[in-house]
Image (tube, rainbow, N blue to C red):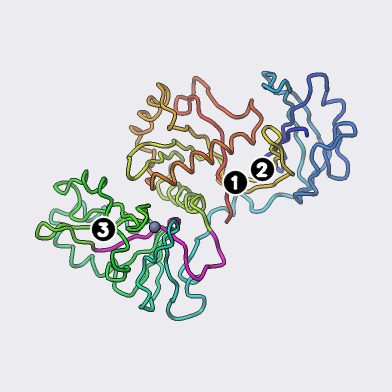
Amino acid sequence: MIPFYAEELGNINVLRASISTEPSCNVSEVLSVSNNAIMLKDQLVADLNAVQVEITTDNLVVAQPPSIQQDKSGLFPWEIKLYLAKAPAPLRSQQAEVKEWWTSKLLLGGAATCKKEIHCQHCDASILDNSVEYKIKDLPSEHWYELVECWICHETKPEEHQARMRPILARPNLLLVGTSYFLIHPDNLSKDSVQVDKMVLDRTNWDRGTFTKWIAVNCSKCKNVIGEGQYCVEDDALKLLAVKIFKYCITIVPALPEHPEFTDYLVSDLINTAKIHATHRFLIQGRQSQNIYALIWLFNWDTNIIYNNGYTHGSSLKRERVMKVIYLDCTKENEQTTRSIGMWSNDKSTDHLIYPDNVCKELVTKLNKSTLILPPFMRTMDHPAMIFTRKFSIGFIHRSD
Ligand SMILES: [Zn+2]
């Protein structure tokens, strides 16, 4: 198999491809395109009919990357520029909207109330009281909450607003649907199904900030993260006011037609935050450990790549819709990682996204795996002038929306 990787550059209708060959092969002399397939003499490199992409041979450019490096496998990389017969959809101008998963409409499925059950994804314990038929409403916006909290935080007497705020927060027998969570009234939880995360609770400082705090909550049965609870202290006792149950920590019974994963919610969070805060830099932090798992720079939030995994184990030709990112895996501790984390943490335009530690770990594993799709010379970036991305890697986050 000849390793193949390509990216569709929709804005200029170009398919930019890379292949790697034996040093003796002069690709510029033997490469041809026939019937929409890229060939090296008689050998098939990539049949683009398999991924429904049409290319033309007009203005075909074949060249070796400026600094030619032999891969560890002894192969040499070549870059090929081909033109796309049709612009890939969706176009850059149409990318503004990001799909919402598990909306109230989908949950209700035409009914007035919802009879779905919410179970822990890990141990299948029932989280929601099933004796109730729930009304369902969408929350106005993911950032609405943030605005409200920000506003309370700046009040001189936040407790005055408590009564006014509570009614629009959790209400009994009402499921409020956010982009990545359900907001539930504590009375509607199955008895003892969730418990506060002791580690996070112990480091909560009640003398600072808001009157109520969001603290991680876990499934009581298997101790895995399930969401966060809004707590306050009343007469020296911890009181639960509302619970956010993360959609990526649960299963819905009976199942819904959509099966989103954590990365689908991450894509929503990245795009929504990028739009509202006008930033492309994100620091991914674990909720329990507070460790920084990755620094992510959004490079292109909607592109298609075509590849055959030939730089690793090899597979059939795949076309995948992705977000292209530049990232640093911060789980490998070294001097450069510490320096980059410091720089990004102090940068006001960098946004912090906090998730349960287990999904952060999964994300880093997926990012590292995605880098291997690329030819070795394209995997890292380390330009001395680009101080924010020294020793960063290129990777992809799958988009299934
Ligand atoms: Zn569980």
* Residue kind at label 1, given as amino acid type: Val
The segment highlighted magenta reads 241-259
Taking depth in this image into account, of 382 and 330 the one nearest to the observer is 330
- Does the residue at mark 3 contact the one at mark 1 (Cβ under 8 Å)? no
* Disc 1 Cβ-to-ligand 1 distance below 8 Å: no
Question: Label 1: which residue?
Answer: 322
Question: Label 3: which residue?
Answer: 230
Question: Label 2: which residue?
Answer: 305
**Tag 1's secondary structure?**
strand
Q: Nearer the viewer, mark 3 or mark 2?
A: 3
Determine the residue positioned at 78% across, 49% down.
50
Determine the residue positioned at 40% across, 21% down.
335
Q: Is residue 135 above or below residue 23?
A: below
Residue 229 in percent (x, y) is at 28, 58
Are there few (<14), some (14-19), or many (20+) residues within 10 Å of tag 3?
some
Question: Between marks 1 and 2, how big is the CA–CA gap?
Answer: 7 Å
- Does the residue at mark 3 contact the one at mark 2 (Cβ under 8 Å)? no
* Residue kind at label 3, given as amino acid type: Gln
* Residue kind at label 2, given as amino acid type: Ile
Circle nearer the N terminus (3, 1): 3
Q: Is residue 143 left or right of residue 73?
A: left
Question: Between marks 3 and 1, how big is the CA–CA gap?
Answer: 34 Å
Taking depth in this image into account, of 109 and 127 the one nearest to the observer is 127
Q: Is residue 295 left or right of residue 221?
A: right
Q: Is residue 357 above or below residue 190?
A: above
Are there few (<14), some (14-19), or many (20+) residues within 10 Å of tag 2?
many
* Disc 3 Cβ-to-ligand 1 distance below 8 Å: no
